[in-house]
């Protein structure tokens, strides 16, 4: 609609500056040192929703970080879209690898460089500006509710409680989320599913104190060495995960489904070049697309122990640690997988060490129905603004609360993301394309328009 284009063109610079202001707030949910900043960011989101035209905007306190809620009910008889996003961000470490300050956004080569630019401040804020566009042009076609939380990056521990306590307030017809990626702006795509997550931390203890590696080395088990061997044993020579029962409930795709999945454009040489690697590596018998979308994985996210400071210290460490995440596929339950991991890890530990396994957080995998009115609306919206139909793909990441929306609220979710896999999510120098940001603002109003029209039929 021309009225939307005109409004967005007139306010383009302001839309960007408002996002940059949000990006300057270090709302790191995992680090208690930033608790004041997460609260400040929630208040900023509340203010922006109010300015955009939302009603009943509230910062809802939880046992952790707050949730921001707002709504615009134009007619109770019309369908309602619940927009979900998160304002919390990942820690910025290691800071020395950033080209610029993680919370000092810089625009370079058409990208916004800052922590949270793509995940998820830039993406959820598209919805706020799309809503403003419709509100200010008197063209909102359906009811819209917003729920923007501050704990997604730490497992959304308090969101389930909030959902249970606010079922009436959160009544809707579908959940709409932009926290995923597409293949490219030239080849738009739409996610039809997400993997689940089980996040663990392990601690291996040997002697009761750090020891002199010359006096005790060779006679006492080194926890760092033992931990490395235990982790290495979690995959076999085919990169198949060795935890007993791990694959028992994995939903296998048919040959036709795998063929369709691999039809998506993918340049493996460009993929390797972008990552600076000589070759790809993963579970034998599966393509890179399959390994990152439809297969479960186990990865070490961090490992430490002993002396890691400057220079040398000849020490045999008392303890060694690792953080390990497992991405799960349909039919795998993250609680069950966590238990299987714990049992196995404890079983493979030699008597010379003690092992402690801690379950942090997780979430279930999710598959979006592609025959729903909401999915069709997203498909048509992207087709309208990109000039070509989006390719359906499986996302490799996890949004643990998507399955919770269906379980608690009875709502299906549409995953309409505008980021790119190359946006350095969770890494130094996270970025989000200006073109992606503006394209999202342009496209989202069409989703609401088509959803309202299709829901009437």
Image: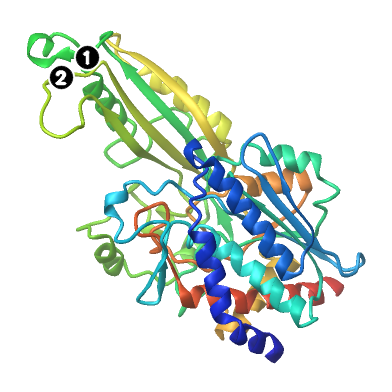
Residue at image x 62%, y 37%? 64
Q: Judge whether residue 217 can be spotted in this image.
A: yes
Task: Give how far across and how far down residue 36 sits, in percent.
Answer: 55, 43
The quarter of the picture where residue 268 lies is: bottom left
Secondary element at tag 2: strand
Q: Quadrant of the C terminus?
A: bottom right
Q: At which x and y percent is residue 411?
A: 75, 53
Q: For mark 2, does the 10 Å Cα neighbourhood hold few (<14), some (14 to 19), or many (20 or more) residues?
A: some
Q: Is residue 336 left or right of residue 173?
A: left
Element type at marker 1?
A: loop
Q: Who's the residue at 56% across and 35% down the image?
A: 334
Q: Which of the 4 image quadrants contains residue 441?
A: bottom right
Pointer 2 and pointer 1: residues touching (CB < 8 Å)? yes
CA neighbours of label 1 inside 10 A, class few (<14), some (14 to 19), many (20+): some
Image: 14 above or below 40: below
Q: In this view, does 198 lie to the left or right of 138?
A: left
Residue 14 in percent (x, y) is at 57, 76
Q: Which residue is drawn at 65% across and 89% down?
A: 6
Q: Name the residue under label 2.
A: 315
Please give left or right for residue 194 compared with residue 342 in the image: right
Depth check: give the residue in front, 67 or 241. 67
Toward the viewer: 156 or 176? 156
Image disc number at residue 210? 1
- The quadrant the N terminus occupies is bottom right
Q: How far apart are marks 2 and 1 (CA)?
A: 6 Å
Q: Where is residue 307 in the image (x, y as percent from the top left)?
A: 20, 26
Residue farthest toward the left in the current orientation of the protein: 214
Up-down relation of residue 122 to residue 454 (above or below): above
């Amino acid at each position: 609609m021309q009225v939307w284009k005109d409004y967005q063109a007139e306010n383009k610079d302001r839309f960007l500056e408002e996002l940059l202001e949000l990006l300057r707030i270090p709302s790191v949910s995992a680090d208690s040192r930033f608790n004041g900043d997460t609260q400040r960011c929630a208040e900023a989101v509340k203010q922006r929703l109010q300015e955009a035209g939302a009603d009943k905007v509230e910062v809802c306190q939880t046992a952790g970080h707050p949730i921001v809620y707002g709504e615009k009910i134009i007619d109770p008889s019309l369908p309602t879209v619940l927009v979900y996003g998160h304002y919390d961000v990942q820690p910025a470490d290691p800071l020395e690898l950033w080209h610029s300050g993680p919370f000092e956004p810089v625009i370079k080569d058409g990208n916004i460089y800052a922590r949270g630019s793509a995940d998820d401040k830039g993406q959820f804020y598209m919805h706020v500006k799309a809503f403003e566009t419709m509100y200010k042009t008197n063209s909102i076609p359906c009811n819209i509710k917003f729920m923007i939380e501050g704990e997604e990056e730490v497992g959304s521990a308090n969101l389930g409680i909030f959902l249970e306590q606010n079922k009436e307030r959160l009544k809707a017809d579908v959940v709409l989320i932009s926290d995923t990626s597409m293949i490219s702006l030239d080849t738009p795509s739409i996610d039809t599913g997400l993997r689940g997550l089980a996040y663990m931390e392990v601690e291996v203890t040997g002697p009761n104190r750090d020891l002199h590696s010359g006096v005790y080395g060779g006679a006492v088990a080194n926890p760092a060495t033992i931990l490395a061997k235990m982790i290495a044993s979690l995959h076999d020579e085919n990169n198949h995960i060795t935890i007993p029962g791990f694959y028992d409930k994995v939903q296998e795709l048919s040959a036709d489904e795998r063929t369709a999945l691999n039809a998506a454009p993918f340049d493996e040489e460009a993929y390797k070049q972008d990552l600076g690697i000589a070759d790809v590596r993963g579970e034998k018998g599966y393509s890179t697309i399959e390994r990152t979308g439809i297969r479960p994985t186990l990865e070490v996210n961090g490992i430490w122990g002993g002396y890691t400071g400057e220079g040398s210290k000849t020490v045999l460490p008392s303890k060694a640690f690792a953080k390990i995440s497992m991405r799960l596929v349909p039919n795998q339950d993250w609680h069950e997988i966590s238990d299987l991991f714990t049992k196995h890890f404890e079983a493979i530990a030699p008597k010379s060490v003690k092992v402690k396994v801690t379950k942090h957080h997780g979430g279930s995998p999710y598959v979006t129905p592609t025959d729903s009115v909401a999915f069709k609306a997203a498909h048509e919206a992207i087709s309208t603004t990109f000039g070509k139909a989006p390719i359906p793909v499986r996302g490799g990441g996890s949004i643990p609360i998507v399955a919770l929306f269906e379980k608690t609220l009875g709502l299906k979710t549409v995953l309409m993301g505008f980021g790119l896999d190359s946006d350095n999510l969770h890494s130094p120098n996270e970025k989000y394309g200006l073109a992606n940001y503006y394209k999202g603002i342009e496209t989202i109003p069409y989703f609401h328009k088509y959803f309202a029209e299709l829901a009437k039929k």
